[in-house]
Image: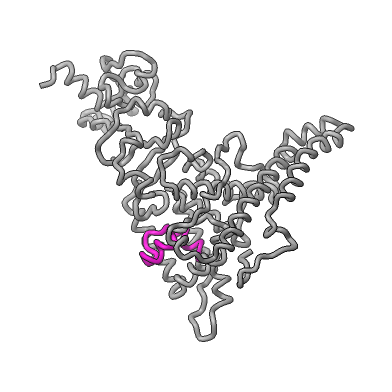
Amino acid sequence: MIPGSDASNARGRRERPCDACRKRKSRCVIDESLRKSCMACGVHGQECTYNEDPQPRKRRLDNQGHELEALKRRSTAPEVPRRTVTLQTFTSMPKSDSPSATNPELYPLQNWVYSTHVGHTTELEPILFDLSAPGSNSMPESSFQKRDERTAFLVQQPRHDSTRPSKVSAMRDVEKLVKPHGPLLMHAYHSTLHRDYPVVEDELFHHYVSSGGQNIDPALLSAMYCLAVPSLVREVGEGAAPPPDIVRLEDAAFRAFGESLCQPTLSTVQAGLLLMQRPNVDSKTLNTQLVGVAHELGLHLDCSSWCVSDSERSLRKRLAWALYMQDKWCSLIHGRPSSISGTNWAVRGLKDADFAPSAEEAAKGSGSTEMEHGQALFTQMVALTLILSDVLDTFYTLQAMREVEDAGQNGTRLILERAKPVQIKLKEWFAHLPPTLKMDTSITTGKASST
């Protein structure tokens, strides 16, 4: 039996915040490992007490001076126990629940979880998670995972039970729009777009074949179909079923993309990047939305030490740099400030391992020249975009333009001085271009290049 004082204290812990958190009006997160204090009191080095009674609510009176009946009923109702948050570190999670085992970011309809990055200025500072006890239970409705010593994510189930049926219904609607050309569209995308713009993992194509297109985010699936329709139109012969209605397919893609913004995954970023390749799309607005989603998913962070699978780590890096390129070129073309800042960008450079084909692709051994060409094209475009970022920061920020104006007659000299380092970088980039990417050369693979 628990002594009376301890029982009362334990019951108070579950039902209300401690005295200090009540005064600070902050969230009271229980440290289940110590059972003596909440995390905030532990950090501040103060005693965690539950002695003070809640402040009485001010009574609201009607015009005749009588207390409102609704408030009376609420005050006499039994108090609902306060829901506590149990913190779980990533290493304490069962292997079957970890992203490295199931890749919930890659197939959200199958794993049905969503994760958002916990920033360092929030009330739940990630470095405080080490104070929590390693949990041995399965993942609750909402929990925290540490990907490394400084990075944590809030992992949660969908907020509404109707979300999954709506996405499954949207996926079926997309398949109806492309029927019977779904497999042909997927093959066209893989053979013409995938190798030069590798924002989709190889495993998705094998998953599509094995599952018949099930459990793939409808926004991503419809976006891939949209980009593949032009290739299909050129290949459809006489007497075959007409190609899909691109207008209806594009509407379905944007509708599914908009719905996915409420609970974004990596598939949301993939779909957005592909949709921005469509003509007459307002890429300015879409780019801003995608950068916000990327911050939620931690794409701007260095994931090299995270406890995730190699395939997700490589995909994250490719998606991050694809979005980086999209943001900088949108800034140049539309004359808008860049949404990605170099001071908050920690993504490592791309390596050959980040383009390693899946086991199935490697076993086929086909298209190796095209794959190498696509990898070189993507990495060199990233390098060129880094130089473009220097150009934008050096000449086209409001501060840079003001400095040139304040220089007066010396403005031209100031511009030339700042242009010299950028010019040297651009010459070095051009000098180190692989021969296959030179404008006066082409690769011979027996078929036309996708570029």
- Up the image or down, 188 lies above or below 395; here it is below
Residue 199 position within the rendered picture, expressed as x and y whole percent measured from the top left: 52, 55
Residue sitting at 89 percent across and 32 percent down? 409
Verify whether residue 447 appears in magenta: no
Q: Quadrant of residue 182?
A: bottom left
Q: Is residue 217 magenta?
A: yes
In the orientation shown, which residue stands out farthest toward the right? 409
Magenta residues, as a range?
A: 204-225
Viewer-nearest residue: 317 or 246: 317
Q: Nearer the viewer, residue 203 or 16?
A: 203
The colour scheme is one colour
In percent of the image, x 48 and y 67: which residue is there?
A: 186
State the residue at coordinates (42%, 71%): 176
Q: Is residue 289 visible?
A: no
**343 left or right, relative to 190:** right
Q: Quadrant of residue 198?
A: bottom right
Q: Quadrant of the N terminus?
A: top left
Q: Main secondary structure of the magenta part?
A: helix
Instruction: From the top left corner, tell me how far across and down residue 56 is, in percent.
Output: 29, 20
In the image, residue 344 above or below residue 265: above
Q: Is residue 309 above or below residue 216?
A: above
The C terminus lies in which quarter of the figure? bottom right
Residue 384: x, y in percent? Answer: 68, 48
Side of 393 where 81 appears, left or right = left
Foreground of the two, 317 or 155 = 317
Q: Nearer the viewer, residue 247 or 231?
A: 231
- 353 w.r.t. 255: above or below: above
